[in-house]
């Protein structure tokens, strides 16, 4: 097998998607290894998960910077040291600046908790997504792994996994069902990408 691809994970929250990815990358025959977890939220749960997996971490708040570009330049410096082949956004609640996207053009993945291109775009994150799916009367939802481009949730789709919307579903119940699909589809998508590269 060719050298394993080097993956940096960027996350802002609890990190269950990051944990699913790090768990998969513990397998020696998985075609990628986690080389860094970065968070814009010092103290985010994802950082402890990374430490538990023995993955190096970096964290600093975007609030300490003059603006999006300045923060992203600082993040790019941290990433340059880790030399990742791909970035996996896993609940990274920051819109990337165009300069950041260009620095890793075609090499940034994101997980979205709906079947894009529906229910994506500005404001479509967290419970807002599931509430919109329920309000629309959808019979199914799911998770999408896509490349990140300079739009919001608009990059090419890599892989999707569908889940049913059940009668009486609350947004919370649907979110939990979709989250389980996220964990599975993100690992499958990363493996597919690394084997194709
Ligand atoms: C997930 O719901 C995902 O769809 C979205 O952010 C959330 C991340 O959750 N991108 P976790 O931090 O990975 O548990």
Image: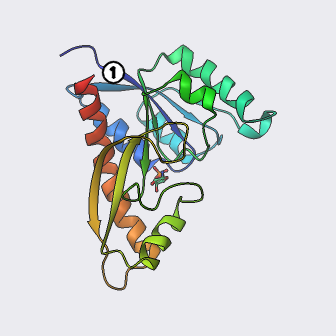
On the picture, is 38 further left or further right than 111? right
Quarter holding the N terminus is top left
On the picture, is 161 further left or further right than 91? left
Would you say residue 107 is visible in this rendering?
yes
Tell me residue 50's x, y (percent).
47, 36
62 above or below 75?
below
Q: Residue furthest bottom?
A: 168
Residue beneath the point at 35% across and 39% down: 21
Would you say residue 26 is visible in this rendering?
no
72 above or below 138?
above
Tell me residue 69's x, y (percent).
71, 30
Label 1: how many Cα within 10 Å (few below 14, some 14–19, many 20+): many
On the picture, is 119 further left or further right than 168? right
178 above or below 187?
below
- Name the residue beneath numbered marker 1: 5
Residue beneath the point at 28% across and 31% down: 193
Quarter holding the C terminus is top left
Which colour assignment does the render follow?
Answer: rainbow
Q: How many numbered marks does the figure carry?
A: 1
Q: Nearer the viewer, residue 130 or 105?
A: 105
Tell me residue 93's x, y (percent).
59, 47
Helix or strand or loop: what does disc 1 sit on?
strand
Residue beneath the point at 55% across and 30% down: 101
Q: Residue furthest right?
A: 66
Residue beneath the point at 44% across and 41% down: 155
Quadrant position of residue 71: top right
């Amino acid at each position: 097998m060719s050298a394993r691809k080097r993956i940096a994970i960027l996350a802002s929250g609890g990190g269950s998607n990051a944990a699913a990815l790090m768990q998969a990358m513990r397998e020696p025959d998985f075609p990628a290894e986690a080389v860094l977890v970065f968070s814009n939220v010092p103290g985010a749960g994802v950082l402890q998960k990374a430490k538990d997996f023995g993955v190096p971490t970096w964290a600093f708040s975007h609030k300490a910077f003059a603006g999006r570009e300045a923060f992203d330049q600082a993040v790019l410096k941290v990433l340059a040291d880790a030399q990742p082949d791909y970035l996996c956004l896993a609940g990274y609640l920051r819109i990337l600046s165009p300069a950041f996207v260009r620095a890793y053009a075609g090499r940034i993945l994101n997980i979205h908790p709906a079947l894009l291109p529906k229910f994506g775009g500005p404001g479509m994150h967290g419970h807002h997504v599931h509430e919109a799916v329920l309000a629309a009367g959808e019979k199914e939802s799911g998770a999408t792994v896509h490349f990140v481009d300079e739009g919001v949730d608009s990059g090419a789709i890599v892989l999707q996994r569908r889940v049913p919307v059940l009668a009486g579903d609350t947004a919370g119940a649907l979110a939990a069902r979709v989250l389980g699909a996220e964990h599975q589809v993100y690992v499958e998508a990363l493996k597919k990408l690394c084997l194709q590269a």
